[in-house]
């Protein structure tokens, strides 16, 4: 497990590190802003990633955002990260495809000639031909 996501802090320690009251963490969890890990006994455990998220929540709250606004910003930031990772992955796939195409050589590509045919309107039996 990555160190950032390894849940080790109890609620009181996480609250102290983040500079908030433990009840605030419970509120954030109820509002969907935070999802700490749980022990088999049901106790919350917070990771370094959770602490960083708490600090981001505090930054947004200091800017005057309400909890719903903060939740939406966090979702959008998460989506930006996901999309950025996808762009990186697609760039890598494209680079690999270009490399693979270059290895195969140009001899596999066959030019195709196309002609454009223009069809005139066929006169109706009811129309007079000129």
Image (cartoon, rainbow, N blue to C red):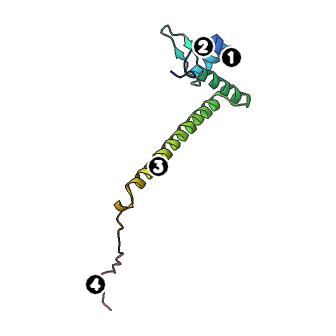
Of badges 2 and 4, the one in the foreground is 2
Number of disc labels: 4
Q: Marks 3 and 1, Cα distance to the nearest angstrom? A: 43 Å
Q: Residue at the spot x=30%, y=90% of the render? A: 129
Residue topped by disc 1: 17
In this view, the mark in front (3 or 4): 3
Q: Position of residue 85 (x, y in %)?
A: 53, 39
Label 4 vs 1, first from the N-terminus: 1
Which badge, 1 or 2, is on the more N-terminal residue?
Answer: 2
Instruction: Identify the residue shown where x is 47% and y is 9%.
Output: 40
CA gap between label 1 and label 2 equals 10 Å
Q: Secondary structure at mark 1?
A: helix
Q: Earlier in the sequence, mark 3 or mark 2?
A: 2
Q: Which mark is residue 126?
A: 4
Q: Is residue 82 above or below residue 21?
A: below
State the residue at coordinates (53%, 37%): 82
Query: Which residue is most to the left?
Result: 125
Q: Quadrant of residue 43?
A: top right
Local SS, label 2: loop
Q: Is residue 123 left or right of residue 37?
A: left
Nearer to us in this view, 46 or 72? 46
């Amino acid at each position: 497990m990555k160190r950032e996501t390894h849940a080790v802090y109890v609620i009181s320690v996480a609250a102290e590190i983040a500079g908030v009251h433990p009840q605030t963490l419970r509120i954030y969890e109820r509002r969907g802003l935070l999802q700490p890990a749980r022990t088999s006994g049901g106790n919350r455990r917070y990771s370094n990633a959770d602490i960083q998220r708490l600090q981001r929540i505090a930054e947004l709250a200091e800017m005057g955002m309400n909890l719903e606004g903060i939740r939406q910003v966090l979702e959008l930031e998460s989506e930006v990260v996901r999309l950025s990772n996808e762009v990186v992955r697609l760039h890598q796939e494209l680079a690999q495809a270009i490399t693979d195409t270059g290895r195969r050589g140009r001899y596999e590509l066959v030019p195709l000639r196309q002609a454009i045919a223009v069809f005139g309107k066929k006169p109706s039996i009811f129309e007079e031909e000129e």
